[in-house]
Amino acid sequence: MLLEVKDVKARYGNIEVLHGVSFSVDRGEIVTLIGSNGASKTSMLYSLARLTPPDAPVVSGGDILYNGTSILKTEPHILIQKQMMVLVPEGRHIFGNLTVEENLKIATYPYRKDINSEAISSEKKDLVYGLFPRLHERRKQRSELLSGGEQQMLAVGRALMTGCETILLDEPSMGLAPKLMFEMFKALQKLNFIKHTTILVVEQNAKVALDFASRGYVLKTGEIIAAGSSAELSAKADVRKAYLGGR
């Protein structure tokens, strides 16, 4: 198992937001965490990415294993330098005054001292432009002038430039037009197919998430309340009623 979350508890100050969460993601899988607002989905991702307070909660119990090794004491930049995990946060957080190409180049910082850094950067950039042709068309354009969907593609592309084997996506469909949302998820599925990149996606749009992922977990107020394949979760009456608009 590539990523194992074992009975993780986390809190902001005195307020516990994760109450013993356990789940796993195997190498090369696409897995989703779904749930409504306030389910602590983002808190879970921030805990995995080892972000620090006040932006992220403090893990107060349990363990997070990556390739069988605990990462609870690993700083976020080390996860990236060792090409383990990278977070694509909600809201994109791109550098608006920089061009698309400059945003991508910034993400090559972890392997800047590699003797083959230029070749590595070129290879990663070709991958990004191959997945997102729109970014190649706009590579010399300031990123603040991109559409919301294009900015989301850039945020994902910047994550790919790190070479990390696992990508954590926080609400990637938020604010996207349906056409661009479809393009982005199709590109991510292609990435998973050709590079076997492991993807864990947090998504409020449960239908989109379950169509995208092979497996999922339902998070409610900091606890896992259901798990299974996308087909199994979609067939559950309570999941359909609460998250898919069905009966």
Image (spheres, grey):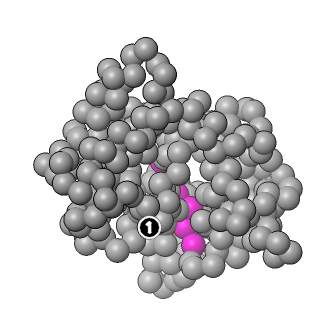
Question: What is the three-letter code of the residue carrying label 1?
Answer: Gly
Residue 72 horizontal side relative to residue 87, left or right: right
Residue shown at the point (26%, 50%) measured from the top left: 100
Q: Is residue 146 above or below residue 35?
A: above
Q: Is residue 111 above or below residue 147?
A: above
Instruction: Provide the residue designation for mark 1.
Output: 91
Q: Nearer the viewer, residue 64 or 27?
A: 64
Q: Nearer the viewer, residue 55 or 185?
A: 55
Q: Position of residue 130 (x, y in %)?
A: 22, 39
Q: Is residue 215 above or below residue 43?
A: above
Magenta segment's dominant SS is strand
In the image, farthest residue toward the top = 115
Secondary element under disc 1, as helix, strand or loop, is loop
Residue shown at the point (70%, 66%) measured from the top left: 54
Q: Which residues are magenta?
A: 28-35
Q: Can residue 12 be seen at all in this image of the molecule?
A: yes
Is residue 144 found inside the magenta-colored segment of the image?
A: no
